[in-house]
Image: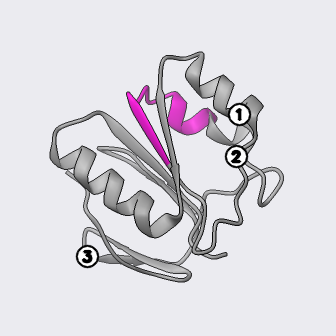
Amino acid sequence: MPRLSDYAFGRVILDGEAHTRDLVVTSGEVLSPWVRQEGHRLVSEDLAWVLDRAPRVLVVGTGAVGRLVVPEDTINYVAARGIVLVVRRTARAIDEFNALEGRGEQVAACLHLTC
């Protein structure tokens, strides 16, 4: 079970290892760096890797101040696949991910670590 902790602008600890690039975390895999097509705008193509792993819940961390935008068409794209989408600033997204993972949910997190 992955555990995220000690988030600070541009850095997070995953199972004791520091990560300084945006990342995607599932129950058994990590994708880092997570690079998006449009930088601070999340498009459906940015989610292909994580959606292939079929999480029941997808938590998106939008950065320390929430700069990553999740447009309505991306929200609809995720919902059409029957996946619950939770969008929060990254510190709160990490808390959500850890809580869901701790309850045994099939959850994944896409985390923007900076702005």
Residue at 83% x, 53% y: name it.
38
Label 2 close to label 1 by CB (< 8 Å): yes
- Secondary structure, mark 1, is helix
**x, y percentage for residue 57?**
40, 34
**x, y percentage for residue 74?**
71, 33
Place residue 9 in its image quadrant: bottom right
Residue at numbered disc 2: 70
Q: Tell me which numbered mark, 2 or 3, is placed earlier along the sequence.
A: 3
Vertical arrangement, residue 78 with respect to residue 60, above or below? above
Which of 32 and 47 lies nearest the eye of the viewer?
47
**x, y percentage for residue 44?**
71, 34
Tell me, yes or no, whether the highlighted magenta stretch contains residue 88.
Answer: no
Residue at numbered disc 1: 74
Q: Amino acid at mark 2?
A: Val
Residue at 25% x, 62% y: name it.
3
Within-10-Å neighbours for mark 2: few <14, some 14–19, many 20+: some
Q: Is residue 10 left or right of residue 107?
A: right
Mark 3 and mark 1: Cα distance apart in space: 32 Å
**x, y percentage for residue 93?**
43, 58
Q: Amino acid at mark 1?
A: Thr
- Secondary structure, mark 3, is loop
Q: Is residue 102 left or right of residue 58?
A: left
Residue 16 is marked as 3
Label 3 close to label 1 by CB (< 8 Å): no
Q: Which residues are magenta?
A: 48-59
